[in-house]
Every structure is written in structure tokens, then in C-alpha cells.
Image: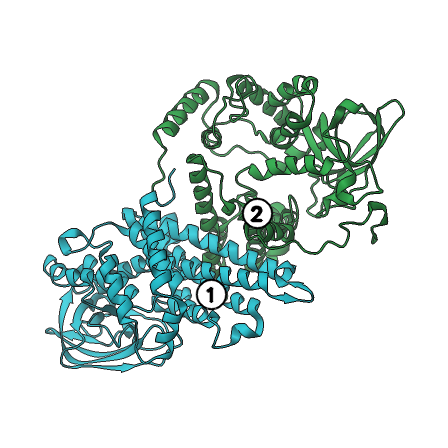
């Protein structure tokens, strides 16, 4: 039984924490949050120099080929730091989509650039509020031309390329879906920056009007390809969420120990202690589920979809709870713009929605359980 | 990251399997043991438990981490877990009756008893001839254990006389001996006036009465002590040091990996129920509210399962388990209560039935009835949250208004 990260992986994690604690303070996050840039370009460049982008990209495609466990420990640190960079969209979504559905030629074309930090990528699927369903995908891909509109695309304002879920055969539903890669700087692409809750992560609507697009994977497999990408991204994102949730607990604890009311630290009141104990329990459960996801991701286990959905739901719940109760523990000051608490509250919601909402992932858990019990 | 044994662990597992093959039969389906029957002292099951314990003790598998010749092999906690995993695949009797004695009482005796006592009591307990219970909780002292009132008074001849009562004592009715925490000085603050003894549970002054629980069963007892005479050599630790001794006992309790399982009632059973029921909008298993709940409870169960694996990894690497080991009961007990109540709601009017008349032989009614007890026994949800807050997160203790007050001046309620 060795259900833990190796010493080398822990060392990598320590390095990442040290690096980010110097280069990405909450002041860095605040600057992006309050400024007109959608990310910290300088931090992005430095992270690329560390080689993190290519952690799990095989060496033949320009990456370090270290593996997914290494990427998981980095993800946790990115989550702790609330790093305002397009790491998750480029590395967990765009690069994974290429690895899953791309031809060798496509991998050679895009992945080395990702690994070097020269390409910002993203993934576009939703077209309106509510569930993303095959029948609701109206964006069409015909003869290498893409037309339609995607909404709230994460890192849309700054991305160079997007993987887009499109319909190749109107009325065919899931059987007509296919992924494709689009150069967002090309002709026929219009972006409208969104106003979003978490201003440290830019989002935009993207309209395609006969934009050039290259198919990625086979027609008719777009939906399952997308699901595989989302499963992998969900595990990596769960580590970000667990990292964020742990920071919320640490902030709440630190504040409670130093804030006095009624003549004593508020941390001595059971109402506060029990709240923090509950945060701890949720965070540990989420961490354990994320570890199982990491194992499934690194070994390509059959259990990957169930492990991914469980990691996703558990981490989303933990980060939600920790971020809101962190504000509650701080009291009024926690609700001010000047304090950092709201960054975590908003990031918890952003990470909890960006790969699809809890409701959909919970349904996926039960579907997986139904098939595994059948 | 993997779930494989290390080479040493694999070798040990092989050795254990060979020994089990030679000494027991492989299980064919689940062994049917009703825990409540067990508590009531079903004689056959007890005899089987004692017989199997003796076989294990001889081979050094009764208490694997203890030294050779004392029922152990000087093994690691991981080896202990491996033995448990393998043993559970065989049709052998439950070691439950010995858990408290060997897990808590005998370690306390080994730490504080004299040589003669160790020679006399350790081996019979290890091989299951004698069963021990732990007598701490009282009607007036549950979560606040140190608030206990059972008196031990010193006699002129150096012996002691014990009077009072204890409650919630698991297995008292079939125990031979018990360790008992008593008040020897009511004029000092509550933690300072306590002293620990061990006593003979067959003493005529010991009156054991089963408590009928809200669930209908009787797994626990109330015990009355009337003029029990004990020798000074039965004292464990110094006079007035009882609290320190009790902490040793409780520390051994916390080292036990695992915690309550909620009787195995979990998401799989709820899914099985949901597959059979029809709701207003179709099959229950297709109902969005049902699916959401199933997923919520599944991630908590899965989270606990993988948390246990993290704990085992720490043990396997020779480290102390981290604080993650302390969360199990909080999660399990509430989940059992909520999940059972939800299942009964799905059953509709049939949910009010009990036992064989209810759907799935009343599994959920059973879980619902036992869950309030599980949320209290072995540390209430509230005390466990305090423990996490104080020992894991390092938050300060609550203000204790009785801390420096002599015990006999502490206000009492009803």
C-alpha cells in the first residue's frame, strides 16, 4: 500500500509552493482582479520557464514527460496561490484534448508550443445557460469552417487557440458531434469579454463566422472525447480546489486565533471550533478523493470516470464550504473588498462551474455506479 | 502511488494465508452474526470466539504488535491490518469480545500494574479466557468523564471500598474484570481527585443491569457497585493520578485504526432500494433528487475509504497515522442517520414498518434507529469536533469554569 505521493513529487510540490509564495502573492491576484489585464503575463512566463506547462506532456511532443502525479502536485499549489494565469485551460483542457483526440501531426504542431509557454489554449463547449447537451450544440463544423457562438469561455480573451465542440450534421445529435481546433486570431472569430464573478480569470463569448477549423478526433466521437477531457481536467482541477480550500481553513484559523471578542479569542468558542472542524473533515475527504483520482489518471485505470466525478464533487463541495465559512469566521471584515476572503469565495464558484456544475457531475457518479453494479 | 503490498508485506500476507488455510475454513458468503445477540452473550458465539482467540494467541496472531510470548510477534501495525484483512476472508468467530480488554484495559495494566498482576492477567486475556471491560462513563459524567462520582474510600487496613455506578459499559455482562476510574478525593478539583483500580466483575457487590435502548436492543449496561472491597495492589497508578492513567487508556483507544462502519448500510443498499421503487415521476433510481443524494453520500464514503488508505500508507511506511484518521465516526454516524431517513421517505407509508415487514427487511429502519446511538457512543459528534479543533487544528480549549473548583463545590444540575 503506497497511497501517497513520492518524496520526489513532494519535493516538486515544495518547490512549487516556494516559487508561488514569492511570485504569486494575493497582491498579484488583486492586481489582475482590479486591473484591465486578464492574467499576469509575467508570472505566466516565469511558470513556463519552470517547465510546469509540459509536466505531463510526453518528451516526444516537447514536454518533460514527468507524469500526472507531478502535474497534480503543481495543480494543488496553483490552486493555493489562486494563480491568475491560464494554466488550467491551456494544460488541463487544451493539451489534454490534443493528447486524447489529436493526430501525431496535431500533437507535434501544438504541444511543443504549450510546453514552452508560447501558446494559450482553451476549451469551448457551452452555448447558453442550463445543461450542455448534444442537442443544444448549434455551432456547426462544415468543410473546415466553424460557425456559431460559445459563451463564457475560460481565458477566452487571451487564448490563441481553442478546442471547440461542434455539430457536423445538424439534427444528428451526439452522433454528429466532433471537436476541432480553431485559431482565435484568425478571420471570422469575434470575442466579447464577459463580466465575470472571478475577475482574476478572464472569460469571453466567442462568435465564429466561417472561421477556419481543423477537426480533432473523429466525427461522432466529439461528445465522448470531450467527456474524457473533462474527466482528466476535473481531477487536476480538484487539486486546485483542495489547495484553495486548505488556504481558506488556514486563513479562518489564523483569524480566529487572533481575533478577540467577549474577552477571549473567538477560536475558543465551540461555534467557531466546530465550523473549522467541519472544514477540516470536508477538506480531508476531498483530498482523499483527489488522490484516488490522481491514481486513476496516472495509471489510466478503468475507474477513471467515477474517480474523476467523485474528486470533482468532493473538491467543489469542500472549496465552496471552506470559502464561505472563512468569510463567516472573519465576520464583517471578511465581507470587505480590501480583505482577500472574497477571492477564494469567487474562485471556488468559478472552479466549481467551469468544467460543468456539481449537478451534472453527481449524475455522472450515479451513472457510473449503475454500470459498475450492472 | 499504488495499492500493492511492499515485498515484506506480501511475504507476511503469504505466511498469514498459509496459516489461516491450515487453521480455518474459507468463508462461503458472509458469516451471519447479529451484533446485538453478540452483546447479549449468545453462548455459542462466545465459545467460538474464545476458541479461535486461543488458536491465534498460540501462533502470535492474537496481538501481533505485542512481543513474542505475549500473544504477539513484535510486528508492525501494518502487519496487524494485513492479518485482519486476511482473517476476514475466513469463516472464523468475531474477536469483538476481546477488543476493549486487549485494546485498552490490558495496555493500561501493563503500564501501571505490578509484576504479579501482569503475570496473572495478561496471558489469560490474550488467549481469550478472561474478558475485560472499561468502567469510566457515569450517569453524571458522559462527555465530561472526569465529573464522575463513584467513590473509592481507603480503609484502615489499607484496602479500598468502592460504591457508585457506571453506565454504557460495553460487554460488562460477560466480563471477568474491569478497570474502573473512581473519585478518591472530592475536596480537590475534579481531575486531581481520581484514582484507577482494576476489579473483579464477579464480585457479589457488582450488580449489572442491561439498559433497554431507544432502538429496542440492549447492547449496554448500567452497573451498580455496593461496598466492593479491593486490595491496594489493584490500584493502577498513584492515588490522585487516575486522570493521567485514563488518558493512557484512551490514547490506546485512538490508536485503533478504523472506527464505526455504520453496519455496512451505505450507498449500495440505497441504490438497491431505489432500483425497486416507483416514485411520482417514474423509477426512483432515475429521480434527480435521489441521484443527487446518492452522489453526495457516495463521495463521503469514498473519501473515507481513501482516507483509510492514506492512514494505512503512513503505517506501512512506519509513520504515525496523521490526523486524517480521526474523522471517520463523524462522517459515518451522520451519514447513516441521513441516508436511512431518506430511504424511509422513499418507501413512503411502508417506511413506518419495522423488521421483516418493511422493505429490504427493515435495513433502513434499523440504521435509523441505531444512528442516534452511533452519534453519541465513543465520543459524541460535538466532542469529536472539539478533538479535531484542539488536537489537529491547535485551537484553544473552551473556558472551563470548574477547572480550579474543588469537586464537591461544582454546581450540579438535575
Residue A51, percent across and down?
A: 23, 57
Secondary structure of residue under mark 1? helix
The answer to whether residue B159 is above or below residue A94 is above
**Residue position marked by numbered label 1 in the rendering:** A320
The answer to which of B33 and A278 lies nearer the viewer is: A278
Q: Is B409 on the left-hand or right-hand side of B379? A: right
Residue lying furthest front in this view?
A22
Image quadrant in which you'd find residue B234: top right
The answer to which of B321 and B93 lies nearer the viewer is: B321
Host chain of mark 1: A
Secondary structure of residue under mark 2? helix
Residue A250, percent across and down?
A: 50, 59
Image quadrant in which you'd find residue B156: top right
Assign the N terminus of chain A to one quadrant of the image.
Answer: top left
Residue A201, percent across and down?
A: 34, 72
Q: Is disc 2 on the same chain as disc 1? A: no
Which numbered marker is on residue A97? Answer: none
The answer to whether residue B34 is above or below residue B124 is below
Front disc: 1 or 2:
1
**Residue position marked by numbered label 2 in the rendering:** B329
Q: Is A169 on the left-hand or right-hand side of A295? A: left
The answer to whether residue A198 is above or below residue A93 is below
The residue at 40%/66% (across/down) is A352
Residue A365, percent across and down?
A: 39, 57
The residue at 52%/66% (across/down) is A326
Which chain is the one coloured green? B
Which chain is the one coloured cyan? A
- The answer to whether marks 1 and 2 mark residues whose Cβ atoms lie closer than 8 Å is no
Amino acid at each position: 500500500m503506497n497511497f501517497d505521493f513520492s518524496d520526489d513529487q513532494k519535493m516538486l510540490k515544495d518547490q512549487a509552493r516556494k516559487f508561488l509564495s514569492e511570485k504569486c502573492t494575493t497582491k498579484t491576484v488583486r492586481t489582475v482582479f482590479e486591473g484591465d489585464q486578464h492574467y499576469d503575463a509575467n508570472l505566466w512566463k516565469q511558470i513556463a520557464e519552470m517547465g510546469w506547462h509540459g509536466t505531463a506532456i510526453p518528451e516526444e511532443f516537447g514536454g518533460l514527460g514527468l507524469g500526472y502525479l507531478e502535474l497534480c502536485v503543481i495543480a494543488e499549489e496553483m490552486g493555493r496561490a489562486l494563480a491568475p494565469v491560464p494554466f488550467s485551460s491551456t494544460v488541463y483542457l487544451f493539451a489534454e484534448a490534443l493528447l486524447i483526440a489529436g493526430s501525431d501531426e496535431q500533437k507535434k504542431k501544438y504541444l511543443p508550443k504549450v510546453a514552452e509557454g508560447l501558446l494559450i489554449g482553451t476549451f469551448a463547449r457551452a452555448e447558453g445557460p442550463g445543461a450542455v447537451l448534444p442537442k443544444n450544440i448549434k455551432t456547426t463544423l462544415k468543410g473546415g469552417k466553424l460557425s456559431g457562438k460559445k459563451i463564457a469561455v475560460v481565458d477566452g480573451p487571451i487564448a490563441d487557440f481553442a478546442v471547440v465542440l461542434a455539430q457536423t450534421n445538424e439534427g444528428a445529435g451526439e452522433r454528429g458531434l466532433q471537436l476541432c481546433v480553431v485559431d482565435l486570431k484568425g478571420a471570422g472569430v469575434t470575442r466579447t469579454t464577459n463580466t465575470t464573478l472571478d475577475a482574476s480569470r478572464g472569460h469571453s463569448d466567442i462568435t465564429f463566422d466561417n472561421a477556419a477549423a481543423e477537426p480533432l478526433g473523429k466525427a461522432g466521437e466529439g461528445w465522448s472525447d470531450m467527456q474524457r477531457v473533462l474527466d482528466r481536467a476535473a481531477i487536476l482541477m480538484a487539486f486546485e480546489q483542495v489547495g484553495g480550500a486548505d488556504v481558506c481553513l488556514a486563513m479562518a484559523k489564523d483569524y480566529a486565533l487572533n481575533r478577540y471578542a467577549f474577552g477571549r479569542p473567538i477560536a475558543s468558542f465551540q461555534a467557531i471550533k466546530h465550523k473549522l472542524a467541519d472544514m477540516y473533515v470536508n477538506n480531508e475527504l476531498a483530498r482523499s478523493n483527489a488522490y484516488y483520482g490522481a491514481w486513476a489518471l496516472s495509471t489510466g485505470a478503468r475507474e477513471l470516470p467515477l474517480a474523476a466525478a467523485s474528486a470533482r464533487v468532493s473538491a467543489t463541495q469542500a472549496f465552496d464550504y471552506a470559502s464561505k465559512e472563512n468569510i463567516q469566521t472573519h465576520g464583517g471584515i471578511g465581507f470587505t473588498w480590501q480583505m482577500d476572503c472574497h477571492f477564494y469565495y469567487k474562485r471556488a464558484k468559478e472552479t466549481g462551474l467551469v468544467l460543468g456544475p456539481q449537478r451534472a457531475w453527481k449524475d455522472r457518479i450515479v451513472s457510473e455506479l449503475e454500470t459498475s453494479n450492472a | 502511488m499504488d495499492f500493492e503490498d511492499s515485498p515484506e508485506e506480501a511475504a507476511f500476507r503469504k505466511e498469514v494465508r498459509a496459516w489461516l488455510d491450515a487453521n480455518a475454513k474459507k468463508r462461503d458468503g458472509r458469516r451471519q452474526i447479529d451484533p446485538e445477540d453478540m452483546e447479549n452473550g449468545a453462548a455459542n458465539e462466545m465459545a467460538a470466539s474464545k476458541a479461535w482467540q486461543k488458536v491465534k494467541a498460540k501462533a502470535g496472531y492474537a496481538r501481533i504488535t505485542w512481543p513474542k510470548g505475549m500473544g504477539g510477534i513484535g510486528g508492525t501495525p501494518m502487519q496487524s491490518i494485513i492479518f485482519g484483512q486476511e482473517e476476514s476472508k475466513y469463516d472464523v468467530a468475531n474477536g469483538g469480545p476481546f477488543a476493549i480488554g486487549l485494546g485498552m484495559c490490558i495496555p493500561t495494566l501493563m503500564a501501571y500494574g505490578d509484576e504479579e498482576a501482569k503475570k496473572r492477567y495478561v496471558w489469560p486475556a490474550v488467549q481469550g479466557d478472561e474478558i475485560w471491560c472499561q468502567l469510566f462513563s457515569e450517569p453524571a459524567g458522559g462527555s465530561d468523564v472526569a465529573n464522575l462520582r463513584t467513590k473509592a474510600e481507603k480503609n484502615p487496613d489499607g484496602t479500598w471500598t468502592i460504591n457508585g455506578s457506571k453506565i454504557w459499559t460495553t460487554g460488562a455482562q460477560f466480563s471477568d474484570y474491569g478497570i474502573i476510574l473512581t473519585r478518591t478525593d472530592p475536596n480537590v478539583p475534579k481531575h486531581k481527585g481520581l484514582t484507577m483500580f482494576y476489579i473483579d466483575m464477579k464480585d457479589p457487590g457488582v450488580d449489572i443491569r442491561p439498559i433497554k435502548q431507544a432502538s429496542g436492543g440492549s447492547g449496554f449496561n448500567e452497573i451498580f457497585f455496593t461496598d466492593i472491597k479491593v486490595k491496594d495492589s489493584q490500584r493502577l497508578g498513584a492515588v490522585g493520578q487516575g486522570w493521567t492513567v485514563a488518558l493512557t487508556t484512551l490514547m490506546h483507544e485512538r490508536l485503533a485504526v478504523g472506527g464505526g462502519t455504520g453496519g455496512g448500510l451505505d450507498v449500495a443498499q440505497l441504490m438497491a432500494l431505489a432500483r425497486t421503487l416507483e416514485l411520482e415521476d417514474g423509477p426512483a433510481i432515475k429521480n434527480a433528487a435521489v441521484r443527487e443524494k446518492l452522489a453526495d453520500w457516495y463521495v463521503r464514503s469514498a473519501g473515507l475509504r481513501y482516507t483509510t488508505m492514506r492512514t494505512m500508507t503512513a503505517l506501512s511506511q512506519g509513520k504515525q497515522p496523521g490526523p486524517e484518521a480521526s474523522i471517520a465516526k463523524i462522517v459515518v454516524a451522520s451519514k447513516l442517520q441521513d441516508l436511512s431517513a431518506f430511504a424511509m421517505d422513499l418507501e413512503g407509508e411502508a417506511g413506518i414498518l419495522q423488521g421483516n415487514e418493511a422493505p429490504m427487511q427493515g435495513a433502513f429502519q434499523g440504521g435509523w434507529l441505531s444512528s442516534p446511538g452511533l452519534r453519541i457512543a465513543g465520543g459524541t459528534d460535538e466532542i469529536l469536533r472539539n478533538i479535531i479543533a484542539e488536537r489537529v487544528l491547535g485551537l484553544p480549549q473552551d473556558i472551563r469554569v470548574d477547572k480550579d473548583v474543588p469537586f464537591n463545590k461544582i454546581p450540579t444540575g438535575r
